[in-house]
């Protein structure tokens, strides 16, 4: 397997849907990132801190860490935004959002700080599928009281699923155009036109290409090594299982000879260790062949 050729093919095919291309575009063009957030959330953001591509948030001790595609902070407030590209419905996205939220809060709150220091937090998953099958382009979740859904908890968290498969008229034309661009690469509207120019610029950037190739080569090598370990482990298990079956077969051969000599089943069980029910089946077989 030529890893270089595979990595080059992946780079040639990569679009805005690719996590690396998406996050790198947001990093190199922060104003587009800001405008995208404003369109999705229908809010105004004066300026964002430079997006941190694939920010790593480590859990305490031996907990599971996470890597965020695009993590952005609003310079004019304490608001923060995490934007993730999701290409497959692994059926754990809600739990993943929950875990992301917890680790982001831990990462933001320094020792000794009051809980009120936590600002608003928005986690946005851009999905190429409709997670909830209602035809919406956007699903927004905030903590509310079950007994009175108008009563908000106001814990400052918002979780959003965007769907490129939406069919109803529930978002602006700009968001629809963006989602069509993610889904099918269709370029329409001023914002998407500018975004497409940025993506093409990223795709022709030699350093970005080198970084992508380096990452892909490492991932491919890791996968091949994992497959190799799996094969070795499988072969090892196969040998062990084969040896076990061989030992059992040999023991059963001895038991058959003893059965034919008229030895009691109980004695053969004590001598060979074979289960009584198995010995009885062997005895029936011997009698049918007699």
Image (spheres, helix red, strand yellow):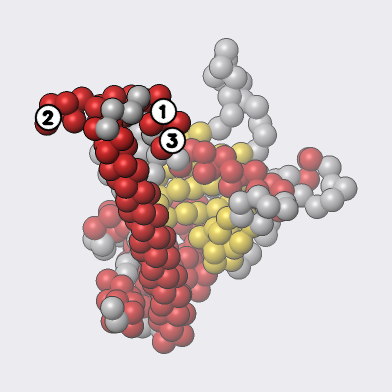
Give the Cα distance between marks 3 and 2.
24 Å
Residue designated by label 3: 271
| Vertical order, 260 against 112 (above or below) | above
| Vertical order, 148 against 250 (above or below) | above
Q: Which residue is depicted at the point 56% across and 59% down?
A: 67
Q: Are marks 3 and 2 in contact (CB under 8 Å)?
A: no
Q: Secondary structure at mark 1?
A: helix
| Vertical order, 208 against 74 (above or below) | below
Image location (x, y in percent) of residue 123: 54, 47
Residue designated by label 1: 267
The quadrant in which residue 218 appears is bottom left
Image location (x, y in percent) of residue 211: 46, 80
Residue found at the very far bottom of the displayed protein: 206
Residue 49 in view of the camera: yes
Q: Few, some or many C-alpha atoms within 10 Å of disc 1 (few <14, some 14-19, many ≥20)?
A: few
Which residue is more in the foreground, 40 or 282? 282
The quadrant in which residue 46 appears is bottom right
Give the Cα distance between marks 1 and 2.
22 Å
Residue found at the very far front of the displayed protein: 261
The numbered mark at residue 188 is none
Q: Which residue is depicted at the point 55% across and 32% down?
A: 142
Q: Quadrant of the N terminus?
A: bottom left
Which residue is more in the foreground, 268 or 211? 268
| Vertical order, 159 against 224 (above or below) | above
Give the Cα distance between marks 1 and 3.
6 Å
Q: Are marks 1 and 3 in contact (CB under 8 Å)?
A: yes
Q: Which residue is depicted at the point 84% across and 51% down?
A: 111
Residue designated by label 2: 290
Q: Mark 1 or 2 closer to N-term?
A: 1
Image location (x, y in percent) of residue 41: 50, 46
């Amino acid at each position: 397997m030529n890893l270089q050729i595979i990595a080059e093919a992946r780079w040639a095919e990569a679009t805005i849907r690719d996590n690396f291309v998406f996050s790198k575009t947001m990093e190199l063009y922060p104003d587009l990132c800001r405008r995208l957030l404003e369109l999705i959330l229908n809010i105004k953001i004066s300026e964002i801190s430079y997006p941190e591509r694939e920010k790593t948030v480590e859990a305490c001790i031996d907990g599971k860490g996470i890597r965020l595609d695009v993590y952005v902070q609003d310079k004019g407030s304490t608001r923060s935004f995490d934007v993730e590209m999701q290409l497959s419905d692994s059926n754990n996205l809600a739990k993943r959002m929950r875990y992301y939220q917890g680790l982001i809060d831990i990462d933001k709150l320094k020792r000794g700080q009051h809980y009120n220091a936590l600002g608003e937090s928005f986690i946005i998953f851009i999905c190429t599928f409709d997670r909830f099958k209602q035809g919406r382009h956007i699903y927004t979740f905030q903590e509310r009281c079950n007994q009175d859904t108008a009563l908000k908890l106001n814990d400052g968290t918002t979780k959003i699923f965007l769907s490129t498969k939406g069919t109803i008229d529930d978002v602006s034309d700009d968001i629809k155009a963006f989602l069509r661009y993610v889904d099918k690469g269709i370029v329409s509207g001023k914002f998407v036109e500018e975004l497409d120019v940025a993506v093409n610029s990223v795709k022709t950037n030699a350093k970005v290409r080198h970084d992508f190739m380096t990452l892909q080569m490492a991932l491919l090598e890791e996968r091949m090594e994992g497959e190799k370990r799996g094969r070795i482990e499988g072969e090892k298990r196969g040998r062990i299982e084969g040896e076990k079956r061989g030992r059992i077969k040999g023991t059963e051969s001895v038991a058959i000879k003893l059965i034919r000599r008229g030895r009691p089943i109980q004695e053969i069980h004590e001598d060979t260790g074979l289960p009584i029910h198995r010995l009885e089946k062997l005895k029936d077989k011997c009698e049918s062949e007699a």
